[in-house]
Structure formats: C-alpha cells, structure tokens
Image (cartoon, rainbow, N blue to C red):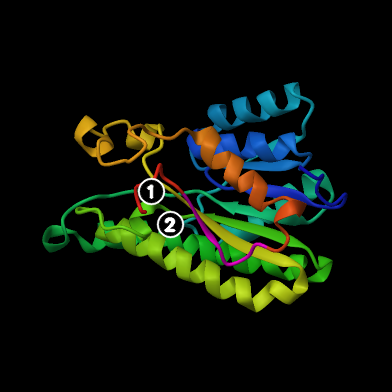
Amino acid sequence: MAEPPAQGCALVTGASRGIGAAIARALAGDGWPVGVNYRAGREAAEAVVAEIEAAGGRAVAVEGDVADHSTPDGLFQAVEAHFGCPVLALVNNAGITDDDLTPTLTDQAWDAVIETDLNAAFRLMRRALKPMMRARFGRIVNVSSVVGLRANPGQANYAAAKAGLIALTRTAAVEVARRGITVNAVAPGWIDTDMTAGVSTELLSQVPARRAGTPHEVAACVRFLASAEASYVTGAVLSVDGGLAA
C-alpha cells in the first residue's frame, strides 16, 4: 500500500476491540498516525495503542461517546493536537445493537441504535469533511452491515441505521468527489467478534462460505479503501460477508 499524506492522521471510532481494533492496526501499518477511539474500554484501547507502537507505528487512545452531540469536536481536536496534523482518514466503526421484533421494538431501542450507528456517523463525517476539502484529500470509510442489504428479523432498528449509512455514504461521495475525497462503506456479515458471539451454527449455515469472517478480513478492505490505490473508488459498498448478500 502507498503511504498516506505526510500531513494527515486517521481516526477510527469504536476501536478498542474487534473490527475497530483490527482497522486501527491495519491503518497504522500503512503509516497513518491513528486515533483509537473508545467509549468505556480504556484499558483495551491503550492495549491497541501499545501494540501499534510496538510495531513501530503511532497511535493515541481518545475517549468519547459518539452518540453525544458534543463528541466530534473533542475527538478531532484531541487527535489533531496529539499528532499536529488534520484527520484525513475517518473510519466510522462504532455501533451498537438492541434487537427485538418490530411489533415490540421500543422507542428507546430504536432511538439508541439510530443515534449511535447513523446520526453519530453523520456528525463525524460533517466534522471531517471541511479540513479534507481544504487539503483536497480525504478518505472516509463507514462500517455498515450485511443487514443494511439483506433482511434479518429482529433487527429493524439496526438494519434501518446501516441502510441509512449506505445512502449517506453514496450521497456524500458524489458531493465531494471532485475535491479528492472518497467516501465508501464496507458491509460485514457474520464476523467473529464479541458482538456476534451468540451466532448459532444454523445462522452460519446460511453463509455460502460456511464460516464466520475475521476482523482482519474486514480491516484489509478498509485499508485498501483508505489507500492511494483506491483514489478512483468512491460511493462503493464492499460486502465482506462470505457471499451472504449475494
């Protein structure tokens, strides 16, 4: 992979474990100084930072609940001040689930998932785009989900958020393409993380590849989309799901 711009750094939300941690490590491996965002897992985030630094990279752990409207400015300021450069790569990975069937899904469960998984990504993108436009370079990758492409009963709120994230990705992509900024999404399927620890063998049997994916496999796709080689890829949704949405 080509190295990132000399005067840019990256921010990965929800990066203390699982897919986010793998993405942070992958971007750091390409030379990006990386802000490792976490909400509650400070020790886990600091462990990711330590691992990156041990491998010769640069990273900093930054606390912040992305569902809080005041968080974007604080996150960006902390990362930019630490590295002395603007955030030119943003990965919106933070997300939650609160599952139930539509007839009994509560307003609280609906609002919480939409706020964290969709609204927060919009606010972070909005904060990222102005400095990217000034730099005439930027990489935004939104972590959607296979359920944004394929129905999964019991996840109406999560599906709506992730489908909305895909639409947001595509719209923003065409708005800023001429400024050298790409906006893409990855749509993971069943990935072996804490969030999918309860996935049954029956559900996995629906995956054509007949196995769960790994955080590393998702991170590899994000790494490509954040690279110089992907400069002509924008508005795309890359499925990482073993064929589940095919």
Q: Residue at x 54, y 67 (%)?
A: 169
Q: Residues within 10 Å of mark 1 (few under 14, many from 20)?
A: some
Which image quadrant for residue 153? Answer: bottom left
For label 2, the SS is helix
For the residue pair 43 and 28, the one nearer the viewer reads as 28
Viewer can see residue 128: no
In the displayed structure, would residue 65 be above or below residue 30? below
In x, y percent, where is residue 213?
43, 35
Left or right for 139, reference 169 = right
Q: Pointer 2: what residue? A: 117
For the residue pair 58 and 210, the one nearer the viewer reads as 210
For label 1, the SS is loop
Q: Amino acid at mark 1?
A: Ile
Quadrant in which the C terminus appears: bottom left
For the residue pair 209 and 156, the one nearer the viewer reads as 209
Ranked by sequence position, the earlier of labels 2 and 1 is: 1
Q: Residues within 10 Å of mark 2 (few under 14, many from 20)?
A: many
Viewer can see residue 118: yes
Q: Amino acid at mark 2?
A: Asp
Farthest residue, direction right:
6
Disc marking residue 154: none
State the CA–CA distance, disc 2 to disc 1: 7 Å
**What residue range appears in magenta?**
233-239
Q: Residue at x 77, y 53 (%)?
A: 228
Q: Pointer 1: what residue? A: 96
Farthest residue, direction top:
54
Tag 2 and tag 1, C-beta contact below 8 Å = yes
In x, y percent, where is residue 80?
77, 51
